[in-house]
Image (cartoon, helix red, strand yellow):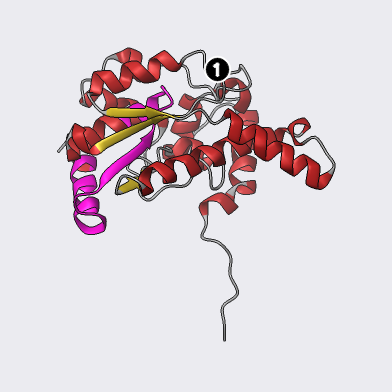
Amino acid sequence: MKESEKVINWIRQYFEENGKGCNAVIGISGGCDSTVNAALLAKALGKERVIGVLLPEGVQDDIQDSYDICNYLGIRYVEINIKDAVDGLSKEVGKALNVNPNEYDIYKTNTPARIRMTALYGVSALNNGRVVNTCNLSEDYVGYNTKFGDSAGDFSPLCMYTKTEVKEIAKELGLPEKYYNKIPTDGMSGKSDEEKLGFSYDELDVYIRTGKIDNLAAKEKIDRLHQINMHKLLPMPHYEKK
């Protein structure tokens, strides 16, 4: 059985047990991961039960890709611009702490991701939905995600597949290459994921699956990122009542 078929069957089983008749709500960024997840959902549930949510922050230069993907898959979609929410929260946080939060990269990067997830759950609440987590193993392994932002969700079809493997599933589904082979970016820094990480997904994916890597500097960085981001992967620490 193809990997895509295994995932489609798993999605059907999830909804059978955790929301029979519910809709799948998914953020559509225009990138590979959300595209492949949306395609799998449409196959598993029928396109009428998939709701795509476009979440630009102000002007998004490549938002046409998101429109095109939704139209290609035949799924319904809505667009929610999060700029006012991000700006409003930043203003109140800044006032409370007497700082400009947008001078801090960790705030600037993570806050929009968390507001996007809040918007997805808002759409889900009003549409009998379940929110899809669109992360992949490669990004999760090195913490290239936002805790309670894009790393959240009700279920995750592809979080145990590397970026390379997600692309293979896209090929199995017959998706046009332009929809899954787009250079991945965070949409904010103007840099690609690989430029920001300092190593390629090909290197990372081979290392994850085989433990082999020739670039020792990349190995050291991957190991360090994996270790310091374990808090994103493990259950929340808690005191065990005795």
Amino acid of disc 1: Val
Read off the magenta span: 7-36
Q: Is residue 11 magenta?
A: yes
Quadrant location of residue 106?
Answer: top right
Quadrant location of residue 198?
Answer: top right
Element type where label 1 sits in the image: loop
In percent of width and height, residue 213 lies at 52, 31
Q: Is residue 18 magenta?
A: yes
> In the orientation shown, which residue stands out farthest toward the bottom?
242
Front residue of 122/213: it is: 122
Residue drawn at x 60%, y 20% as measured from the top left? 195
Residue holding disc 1: 59
Q: Quadrant of the C terminus?
A: bottom right
59 up-or-down from 197: above or below? above
Residue drawn at x 47%, y 17% as measured from the top left? 183
Front residue of 154/157: it is: 154
172 up-or-down from 122: above or below? above
Residue 119 in the figure: left or right of residue 131: right
In this rendering, does residue 165 appear at all?
no
Quadrant location of residue 37?
Answer: top left
In percent of width and height, residue 28 lies at 39, 28
180 up-or-down from 236: above or below? above
